[in-house]
Image (cartoon, grey):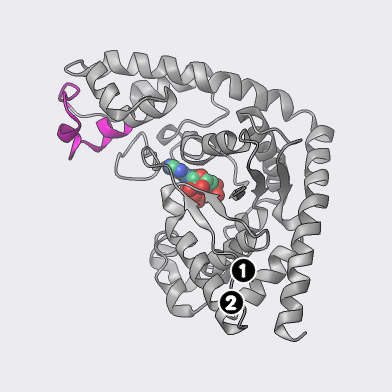
Amino acid sequence: MNKKIFSGVQPTGNLHLGNYLGAIKNFVKLSNDKENECIFCVVDLHAITTKQDPKELRNNIRETVATFIACGINPEKSIIFNQSSVPAHSEAAWLLSCSARMGWLNRMTQFKEKAGKNKEKASIGLFSYPVLMAADILLYDSTHVPVGEDQKQHLELCRDIAQKFNNDYGIDEFLKIPEPLIQKEFSRIMSLKDGTRKMSKSELSDSSRINLTDDKDSIVNKIKKAKTDTLPLPSTIDQLIERPEAKNLLGIYSSITDTTLDKSVDEFKGKNFSEFKENLSQVLVEKIDPITKEIKRLIYDKGFLDEILFDGHKKANKIASEKVKKMHKLMGF
Ligand code: AQP
């Protein structure tokens, strides 16, 4: 069976190594398989669940497209578009929100984390974000959704919403139930400053993450300053328990070099962190620097990036507006 792949990235700036290793690297692999039809969405409607500067948002949308291309997604083979250019996303989100249940959304840990103690002051959009995400996925009859581990719960919710909508309107498989594609290893890259927290764009400290626009010197400096512990590197994976920073850095090394954690542990067993960090910086620079240079080159070619978005918009709009029309018919409109 051909896979229909859908995934999205928020244009909130500072795309980082976690986005690359947890999601975009996998997008590239999937998009290179001729059997797959891939749609990659710049989810700008999701971005505004937290306050955005309109001018910066516009630039960040283009930068996200540039990042997709610089990482290796071919816009001639995959659809790349921005969510707000296809009105069906907002409309389907409303239609699905009438099948989604408050109790389900109340269980979403990302909302709890992002809203923190200010739950009452959080936007309704931040709360209902997973319903919009379900609309994104379901409009395209997506069969597989590659995401980082942090999005697993939202994807389970998407499946529940699809099932409930199908039951509500008495049609099996009208909305296709998608499967998550989550990498078994290194699906959650952690902060360089705290191995128990996710590497994140919104983290205030820039040194907590490697941005995909960081130059060589910044990468080397950030790795040099990355938090570690006082022990030498372990000789078995089991010894990584309760050493979150060592585990994260070895995980990053393994993911970048396409090897297993086992092999990386074996390569550096007993060594000190400074020697390991030199190796880690080197492989990171080798991988990330060409991407950085390409993003910086592409970002000046606004016409090229806008053309890709417009072309993607036409293709996505056709598929999504037809699906919404079918939803209308089913719902009695
Ligand atoms: N640290 C991470 N490790 C692995 N995967 C990650 N992803 C994000 N952070 C990590 C994956 O990247 C894809 C795009 O994410 P997003 O931009 O849509 O939003 P996010 O998950 O909310 O990313 P951030 O960096 O954590 O942003 P903020 O700080 O704004 O909340 C997703 O597939 C995600 O799983």
Q: Is residue 87 at all visible to an observer of this figure?
A: no
Residues at marks 2 and 1, CA–CA distance in whole angstroms: 7 Å
In the rendered structure, which segment of residues is drawn in magenta? 230-248
Q: Residues within 10 Å of mark 2 (few under 14, many from 20)?
A: some
The residue singled out by tag 1 in the image is 175
Q: Looking at the image, is 124 positioned above or below residue 259?
A: below
Count the labels in the image. 2
Taking 172 as reference, is 274 left or right? left
Q: Position of residue 28 (x, y in %)?
A: 59, 34
The x and y percentages for residue 292 are 60, 24
On screen, residue 197 versus residue 176, left or right, reads left
Q: Which mark is residue 166?
A: 2
Q: Are the two marked residues, 2 and 1, in contact with CB atoms closer than 8 angstroms?
A: yes
Instruction: Check the image and report above or below for 126 versus 241.
Output: below
Q: Position of residue 135 (x, y in %)?
A: 63, 65
- Residue found at x 43% / y 38%: 205
How far across and how far down the image is residue 231, in percent? 15, 25
Q: Give the amino acid at mark 2.
A: Asn
Q: Quadrant of residue 255?
A: top left
